[in-house]
Amino acid sequence: MSTYIARDIEPTVLSMAKSFPVVTILGPRQSGKTTLVQKVFPRHTYVNLEQPDVRLLAESDPKGFFNRFAPPVILDEIQRVPDLLSYIQVMADADRSLRGAFILTGSQQLGLRSAVSQSLAGRTALLRLLPLAISELTCAGIKLSRDEYLYRGFMPRLYEDELSPRVLYAQYYQTYVERDVRQLANIRNVIAFETFIRLLAGRVGQVVNMSDLANSTGTSASTLSEWLGLLEASFIVFRLPPYFENFGKRLIKAPKVYFTEPGLASWLLGVGSVEHIGVGPFLGGLFENMVVLEALKARFNKGEESNLYFWRDNNGLEADLIVHGADGLTPVEIKASMTFSKEFATAFARLRKASEKIGPGCVVYAGDLEAEYQGDRYLNFAHTGSIVSNQS
């Protein structure tokens, strides 16, 4: 029997359900959306639109569908029948007192987010749920090492059902990555697509260079750009944009790419055990991937938009992460090292000279010593969320 791990987003979901007739939760497949909404809304009727007979009824007879599944109702994988959004709009407008009557989940952003925004503007809260955060695992009594987190990843089923990472990610790739993305794009060259996604895994935390990837895969840069967009729409990868407001013209303006599940990236790289993480060439990139996503999870779990960027110029000055808050910009240096070193913060002074908007920095690393040194903070990666928790 599965053991449910409480999610940090639960209070946000409940709060939004008291304010809006519709709550829409988007996120990757297997990130825990279904389990979450069934736990938070136990009295709602649950409907899975992946079921062919249910989907056929919704498509062919929407009014009959809602007669059978009257609100309050959970509609899982709403992207399968987006036409239902118009009917939900009508019902929400007919009864202005409705609150939390429709709970929608979706695992694909392509067209769905704009459709939700257009049909349900002012009627829905739009939230995003990523896989488990370290804070959630810690509250459940699960505390792992740096390498164990990177190898196992954060999919709820790994911990609730005690599944093997290698088994789960192999199935996840075949069932969701290949199926969902190939359905969206009708991809015929499966080998080139798999090569592309494995190359992306080897480049986590790096600026995307489509020409280089095109040469490595034998596929045009335009096709790869389309594939990357579909991977992002399916919540497989996440693009971190550069921050270059008022920083001159010598800044890198292409995004960096991360996987929304570091464990999937490790599997794609062929990592066979925890022991291989620390001695492999991908440790730095995978660790950075985990830290950036921990910051993003902290934002999303509070119902906030991403306020995360990176900064890099052509002279080599960079910040792995920039947190844009009400009081300015917080530069973040990410180091996989377990040993404290004041040298980690050397770039912060130069960054502050580059812009008056940049304030005290933060070093996120794998060591246990947490301290403040010359105005900059040093944090263990498990506490990454605290960097963005008080930012607007």
Image: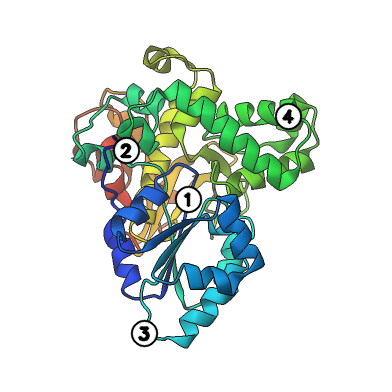
Circles 1 and 3, Cβ within 8 Å, touching? The answer is no
**Residue under circle 3?**
97
Q: Of marks 1 and 2, which one's residue comes earlier in the chain?
A: 1
Label 2 to label 4, Cα distance in Å?
Answer: 40 Å
Q: Secondary structure at mark 2?
A: strand
> Which residue matches tag 1?
27
Q: Position of residue 15 (x, y in %)?
A: 29, 68
Q: Position of residue 228 (x, y in %)?
A: 66, 42
* Closer mark to the observer between disc 2 and disc 3: 3
- Quote the CA–CA distance across marks 2 and 3: 48 Å
- The residue sitting at 42% across, 42% down in the picture is 293
User: At numbered mark 3, what does the secondary structure look like: helix, strand or loop?
Assistant: loop
Tell me if mark 1 has few (under 14), some (14-19) or many (20+) residues whose alpha carbon lies within 10 angstroms of its own.
many
Q: In this orientation, which residue lies closer to the viewer: 148 or 35?
A: 35
Q: What residue sits 63% from the left and 68% below the top? A: 83
Badge 4 amino acid: Val
- Tell me which numbered mark, 2 or 4, is placed earlier along the sequence: 4
Q: Where is residue 274, by image quadrant?
A: top left
Q: Residues within 10 Å of mark 2 (few under 14, many from 20)?
A: many
Q: Earlier in the sequence, mark 3 or mark 4?
A: 3
The residue labelled by disc 2 is: 363
Q: Please count the marks in the image.
A: 4
Residue at (77, 41) in percent of width and height: 223
The kind of residue on which mark 3 rests is Ser
Would you say the residues marked 3 and 4 are in contact, meaning their CB atoms lie under 8 Å apart? no
Mark 3 vs mark 4, CA separation in Å: 50 Å
Q: Quadrant of residue 371?
A: top left
Percent across and percent down for residue 20 are 39, 75
Q: Which residue is mark 4?
A: 190
Could you say which quadrant of the image residue 39 lies in?
Answer: bottom left
Residue 327 image point, x, y percent: 33, 63
